[in-house]
Amino acid sequence: MVDFGFGTLAAKRSDLAVDSAPLQDSVPVTVLTGFLGSGKTTLLRRALTDPAFFDTAVVINEIGEIAIDHYLVDFVEGEVFELPGGCLCCAVREDLAETLRSLIERRDSGEVRRFRRIVIETSGLADPAPILFTLGGDPMLDQRLRLGRVVTLVDAVAGIATLDRFAEAARQAAVADALVISKTDLAPFSEMLAARLYVLNPGAERISGAAATDPAAVLFVDGAAPHRNPLPARGERESDAERRTGEGDHVHSHGISAFTVILGGAVSRLDFARALGGLAQSRGNDLLRVKGILAFADRPERPAVVQAAQHAMFAPEWLSDWPDHDHRSRLVFVVHDITPGEILARFAFASPALLGPQASRLHAGGTPAVRHPTFPE
C-alpha cells in the first residue's frame, strides 16, 4: 500500500517503488452493492447455487439488530460471514477490516475451508467508496486480497427516482465496474435511466438482470474489470441517448462525475505516486474511485493496472501485455465536486488531456467518455 497520509509518501510497502507483482495467493473480492430493494441478495443467491462457486466466502452487512439476509444465502454449502448491524461505510468499517483479516487467518490455519473468492454484500444505504478504501488501506488486506469487481444493482422500476433522491445510490452506480439492471420483468430499462447512468458512470458494463442467465459470471470475473479494459478506447462511439445526455448539465448527479484522462508524456512511478498521493491527501473524501492502465517509464513493455479509492491505493497489477490495441496510459476518475482542471493540474508533468467530445469543457460535470464495447446495442 502506498501511504498517502499527512505529508509523506514513504510507503509501508510501496509497490510503485519496487518491481513487484501481486501475490499469487491473493484472493479476489467482489463488492456487491445497490440501493435498498434492488435485488442484491437474490442475485447473490442465484450465483451461489452454482456448484463451481462453493468455495466462496460471503460477508453480509445489514441495517438493524435482527439479521435476515443470511437466512436467504446460508443454505449454500460453505462459510457465510456476517457483520451485525450498522453500515459498512461508517460505524463498522473497522469491523470489516478485522473480519477480513480473521477470515484470511482462519483460511491459512485450516480452520475454515480454503475459499478462492470473497463477496461483500453491502447494506442498501452504504456508500461503497469507504469499503474500497478499507480493502486498499489495510497493509495486510492489500497484500492478501485484490479488488476483483464492483457490481451495482439498479432497480428498473424505481431507479430514476432513487438516483435523484439518494446520494448513496448515485455513488453506488458511479463506482461500479458492472451495472446490473434488475426488475426488468416489471419495467423496461428505459432510455432515461440509461442516460442517467451514463452521466454517472460512462465506462461501466451494463447487464440486464433478466438476461443474466449466469449470475456467477456477473459477480466473479477473474481479472476484474481493468483487465477487460473498461476504459474508453479510440474510435468507440456514443449512442443517441448518451450524446444527448452529455450535453445536459441539468441531470441530477449529486455532484458526482466521471471522466477519463489520457497521459501523453512519460510517467515515472514516483511522479505518479506524488500526483495521485497529493490529490488523495487534499481531496481523498471526494476521490470516490480511480482506475486505469499505465505504462511506467521504467517498464513500458508491461502495463500496470492501478486502482485507488479515497485515501488508499491498491497494489498495481502488472499485465503481460496491453489488453487491446489502445496503448495509451489512461485513468478514469470518479469524483465528487472535483473539477477535471484540478486533476489535470496534478498530472501536468505527463501532458494530460481529457478524453471525449467535450474535452474542452472543464467543469464539474466531467466529460462523457465514449461507448464501452461490451454495452448492449
Image: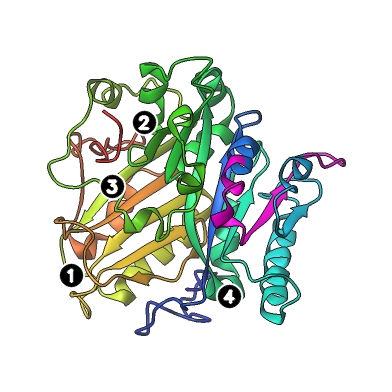
Q: Nearer the viewer, residue 321 or 43?
A: 43
Single out the residue that lies furthest toward the top: 187
Q: State which tag comes first along the sequence, 1 or 3.
A: 3
Are the residues tagged 2 and 1 within 8 Å (C-beta)? Answer: no
* Residue corresponding to mark 3: 260
Q: State which tag comes first along the sequence, 2 or 4.
A: 4
Single out the residue that lies furthest toward the bottom: 18
Residue located at (37% from left, 77% from top): 16
Q: Nearer the viewer, residue 124 or 281?
A: 124
Q: Mark 2 packing: few (<14 Cα in 10 Å), some, or many (20+)?
A: many
In which quadrant will I find the C terminus?
top left
Residue located at (36% from left, 18% from top): 191
Q: Amino acid at mark 2?
A: Val
Q: State which tag comes first along the sequence, 2 or 1.
A: 2
Q: Amino acid at mark 1?
A: Ala
Mark carried by residue 199: 2
Of labels 2 and 1, the one closer to you: 2
Whether residue 100 sits left or right of residue 228 in the image: it is right
Single out the residue that lies furthest toward the right: 65
Disc 1 versus disc 4: distance between alpha carbons? 29 Å
Disc 2 versus disc 1: distance between alpha carbons? 30 Å
* Residue corresponding to mark 1: 266
Q: Amino acid at mark 4?
A: Pro
Q: Position of residue 107 (x, y in %)?
A: 68, 74
Q: State which tag comes first along the sequence, 3 or 4.
A: 4
* Residue corresponding to mark 4: 139
Q: Which residues are magenta?
A: 46-68
Rendered view: 296 above or below 200: below
Disc 1 versus disc 3: distance between alpha carbons? 18 Å
- Helix, strand or loop under label 4: helix
Q: Mark 3 packing: few (<14 Cα in 10 Å), some, or many (20+)?
A: many
